[in-house]
Amino acid sequence: MATNPQELLRALFERAVEVADPMKSLASQLPEKPGGRVVVIGAGKASARMAEAVEAEWGACEGLVITRYGYGRPTKGIEIVEAAHPVPDKAGQDATKRMQELLSDLDGDDFVLALISGGASALLTAPAGAISLEEKQAVNQALLASGAPIGQMNVVRKHLSQVKGGQLAAAAYPAKMVALLLSDVPGDDPAEIGSGPTVGDSSTPEDARQILARWNIKIPVSVSEVLSGQTGVLPPDHECLGRVTNTIFAAPSQSLEAARSLAEKVECDVEILGDALEGEARDVAATHAGLALQKQKERGASERPLILLSGGELTVTRRGDGIGGPNAEYALALANSLEGTAGVHAIACDTDGVDGAAEVAGAIIGPATPSRAAATGVSMSDALDRNDAHEFFRAIGDQVVTGPTLTNVNDFRAIYINGV
């Protein structure tokens, strides 16, 4: 096992991703394949890998799964469609319509297996009412740039959709449905994973209107009209959800525990700060920098390094025109606050390999980050002002690029602290 701090941090991240791989984690929750007609549907950045795992156990299946561009997998019978994320596109809209049609002729003797992971909110695209795809895209982009927490964004998404908030499950009724969920949301609430296409929701159109107003999101007339009436979101006790079983088979907490075990094997102390952290990335980073300095002072010249682990989903309020994501911005803000403190290193990555909209998982920092930036001619504070964290870390060579990981249990952060 690597003893270099940054090699260790990368190994911890890789372990967190590995244990969330559906090929390793899904089979234990998969029921025995029923007799009769079985249809597999799904959406999310991990959904194609989940479909691959299902067919490894059940053999070829009928079905349709929508995943992010570049995240497709070889399957025997389940059709894999790739579409855009985090802003939906026509490919996702067309595939969603076909999925609705596939479910429309099922009866009470049929069985549906739904595979849902993070990313399904964008990939399942069926705008409600007269909302056009372009209008849905604009609202989605504005929400992503606003800094709104994921839970609030999902309330809006549900009420502007024909498939979220339990509506996809309703389309399959009266068929029996088992939904296997890979959690990427703080608190592991099934209703929040992919905006809950198989789970009812008690929010109202008025809640969605208030959220849009709170975050100063300008909306077209079509959105206003949809939110002025009764939307299709199902309450949790709706009869169409009575034949649905929702099961989370992998979650952030499992990945953090796996990272903890690995760190302890190489004689590190570990503290888990939580698997459901939310907030503005730079603010959380400043808090964590203060905690790291406090821990380092308290421990003195301890022979055992301390690892602080955390997960959840941070947000970024766009202030500039740069290229960044919540993990890279967290890492940049952390480095800016630490100011090259000796003995402190950190990694912050999204377990799906995509931080924000960039094909970059995140970044790694250490005591040399300020000097590397100075030698390269880039400024940490300037990059923060412009939300340009990805370009900053590209310039100094400290991006973490994984390619598609085929899973998604959200953010992974680890801070390595050693006495000096």
Image (cartoon, grey):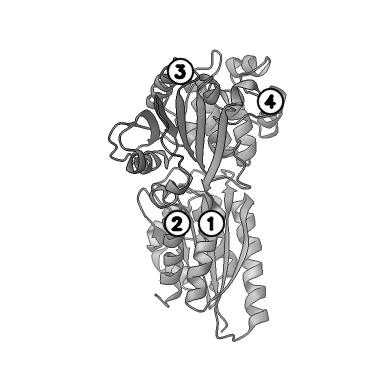
Tag 1–tag 3 contact (CB < 8 Å): no
- Mark 3 lies on a secondary structure that is loop
Quick check: 92 above or below 230? Answer: below
Residue at numbered disc 2? 19
Disc 4 on helix, strand or loop?
helix
Q: Amino acid at mark 4?
A: Arg
Q: Earlier in the sequence, mark 3 or mark 4?
A: 3
In the rendered image, the quadrant that contains the N terminus is: bottom left
- Sort mark 1 into few (<14), some (14-19) or many (20+) by Cα contacts within 10 Å: some
Disc 3 crowd rating (10 Å Cα; few below 14, some 14-19, many 20+) is: many
| SS assignment at label 1 | helix
Q: Report which residue position mark 1 lands on.
A: 254
Q: Are marks 2 and 1 in contact (CB under 8 Å)?
A: yes
| Mark 2 or mark 4, earlier in chain | 2
Given this view, does label 4 or label 1 mark the residue nearer the observer?
Answer: 1
Q: Which residue occupies 29% across, 31% down?
A: 77
Q: Earlier in the sequence, mark 4 or mark 1?
A: 4
Q: Earlier in the sequence, mark 2 or mark 1?
A: 2
Image coordinates of residue 416 in percent, x first then y, are: 53, 72
- Between marks 2 and 4, how big is the CA–CA gap? 39 Å
**Amino acid beneath label 1:** Gln
Image quarter of residue 270: bottom right
How far separated are the C-alphas under marks 3 and 4? 35 Å
Counting from the top left corner in percent of width and height, residue 380 is at: 51, 60
Residue 381 shows up from this direction? no
Which residue is tagged 3? 106
